Image (tube, rainbow, N blue to C red):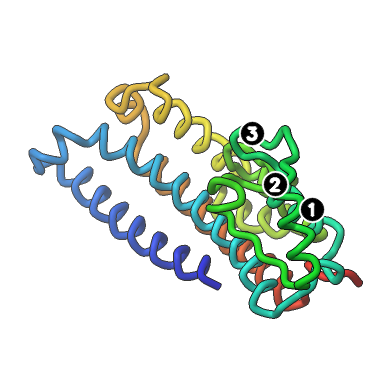
Amino acid sequence: MESWKIYEEQKSFLKDLLKDMETMDKGNNNAFYNKYAQSIKSKFVIMLYTMLESVVMQSLQDIFDHIKQNKISFYDLHDNMKKIYFQAKIKNKERHFNAIVADNLIEIIEQLNNSIVEINLKKDFNSENPFNAGSLNYKNVKDNILAILMSSDSFDSNINKFNKYFKINIQEIIGANTKDRNKLAHGEKSFQDFGSNITVDDLKKRYISIIIFLHKYLKNIEYYIINKGYKNA
């Protein structure tokens, strides 16, 4: 899956950046870092969220690409995937999905006759989440994506094992990171003010939380694809 590649690349990049921040933070003798430390820490929060969003969105495209590559027909799709397909093809994007467009309806009928399902997040959803999860956090991904695609009953218990081991709360930490990212992105908090109130150790906990969460999430998506969860039983 392409999402695994993005995950590994971002994981490695952020890990190296975090190590550099730890080194400079402890050394306290780097003039550049001392001057821009607050902004760097704030940007790290945004990069963590960007990783979360890019991996999750690519994982959904991975599912759609697999369906296309294996020439799965519309009639073989599970009902939840049929709904996504209709949402992708018959709604007017300029009206924020509130109106059905006749031309698009004709297009979908033609595609049904061709029996090949194709969904492209960038083209069909303007790169937005088809599951309407809003800003992504632990709860949104679990309840609005995993729970729709498959059973997510054991997901919390698996994550809680890591909570106990690392003595953190992954669910709450990811939620806090998303809220902070939104405040920074929308100008509700300045980079300087936010960065002065968060430590490198705090950022490390956020990094660990998102890395663990995404790894478990991708394992579930991988299982879903391998076992053809997108098809009718």
Q: Could you tell me which secondary element the residue under label 3 belongs to?
A: loop
Where is residue 1? Give x, y as percent. 55, 73
Residue 168, image x and y in percent? 56, 46
Crowd class of label 1 (few under 14; some 14 to 19; many from 20; radius 10 Å): some
Q: Earlier in the sequence, mark 2 or mark 1?
A: 2
Where in the figure is residue 24, as x and y percent of width and height? Answer: 19, 47
Label 3 or label 1, whichever comes before in sequence order: 3
Front of the two marks 2 and 3: 3
Residue topped by disc 2: 131
Quarter of the image for the C terminus: give it: bottom right
Res 221 → quadrant:
bottom right
Q: Which residue is mark 1?
A: 148
**Residue 192 falls left or right of residue 173:** left
Q: How many marks?
A: 3
Instruction: Determine which quarter of the picture holds residue 225.
Output: bottom right
Element assignment for label 2? loop
206 w.r.t. 95: above or below? below
For the residues labelled 3 and 1, say whether their Cβ atoms are less than 8 Å apart.
no
- Is 196 on the left-hand or right-hand side of 175? left
Out of 29 and 92, give the one closest to the viewer.
92
- Mark 3 is surrounded, within 10 Å at the Cα level, by few (under 14), some (14 to 19) or many (20 or more) other residues, namely few
Residue 158 in which image quadrant = bottom right
Position of 100 relative to 166 (above/below): above
- Write down the residue under mark 3: 96
Q: Callout 2 environment at 10 Å: few (<14), some (14 to 19), or many (20+)?
A: some
Q: Are marks 2 and 1 in contact (CB under 8 Å)?
A: yes
Relative to 119, residue 88 above or below: above
x 26%, y 34%: residue: 39
Name the amino acid, label 3. Answer: His
**2 or 1: mark nearer the eye:** 2
Q: CA distance from mark 3 to mark 1?
A: 22 Å
